[in-house]
Structures are given as structure tokens and as C-alpha cells.
Amino acid sequence: MAGTLKDWITGALDAQLAPQALAVVDESHLHAGHSGARPEGETHFRVEIVSAAFEGKSRVDRHRIVNGILDEAFKRGLHALAVKAKAPSEAA
């Protein structure tokens, strides 16, 4: 995993889900001193994604898809991930 974790997350989701919209936000600074936080950051992220891959999928299934794609990131220090995943028909 080269570069920042944010870049890796963005690239992995882009490659696997071909999103119409994707925002990856490092919110680690909001969790300083909390469990899993590291001084260098890159532990807590928020992802907002719109992809046709989510059409007809439940909220839980969408989160499982995203978490599965990012499994390697969790193994390398990602502690928390907030996900807002929508199908194109739901995005406004």
C-alpha cells in the first residue's frame, strides 16, 4: 500500500465500484485520544459513495461490499469507517 491511506481507499473503491461520486474524508483529527487513534492520523475515515453496484442492495450489504474492498486497509491500521453508500437512483 503506497502513498496515503486516503489515496489507497479512494483508488480501491474507484477500481472496484466505478462510482459516479466518491468522497473519502480523513476524520482522524476528530478522534484524537480515542481508541484506535494514532498521532499520525489515518485511522478514522468517512466515505460517501454513489455506485450502480449498490442498486437493489440493502444498507447492510452495501457496507459489507465497501468493508470487504477495504479489508487490507483495516489490517494496516484503519480503525473506523463511516459509510454512506447510495445507488444512482437514490442520489439527488
Image (spheres, rainbow, N blue to C red):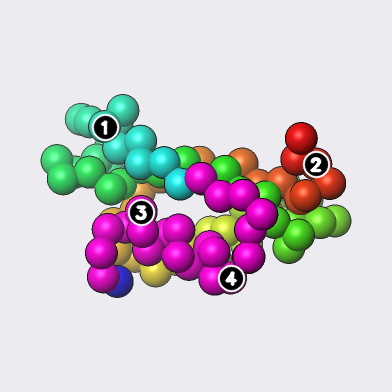
Residue that label 3 marks: 6
Q: Which badge, 4 or 3, is on the more N-terminal residue?
A: 3
Earlier residue among tags 1 and 3 = 3
Give the Cα separation between the discs numbered 4 and 1.
Answer: 28 Å
- Name the residue that disc number 1 marks: 29
Q: Real-space Cα distance between discs 4 and 3?
A: 16 Å
Choose the circle earlier in sequence order: 4 or 1.
4
Q: CA distance from mark 4 to mark 2?
A: 20 Å
Q: Nearer the viewer, residue 16 or 44?
A: 16
Q: Amino acid at mark 2?
A: Glu
Asked where in the image residue 1 lies, by quadrant, the reply is bottom left
User: Closer to us: mark 4 or mark 1?
Assistant: 4
In the image: residue 47, left or right of residue 76: right
Q: Identify residue for label 2.
A: 90
Segment tinted magenta in the rendering: 2-23
- How crowded pointer 1 is (Cα within 10 Å; few <14, some 14-19, many 20+) is rated as some
| In this view, 10 is above or below 72 | above
The alpha-carbon separation of the residues under discs 1 and 2 comes to 30 Å
Residue 22 falls within the magenta-colored stretch:
yes
Magenta includes 43?
no
Relative to 90, say whether 18 is above or below: below
Q: Nearer the viewer, mark 1 or mark 2?
A: 2
Q: Mark 2 and mark 1 in contact (Cβ < 8 Å)?
A: no
Mark yes or no: residue 77 visible. yes
Q: Which residue is mark 4?
A: 16
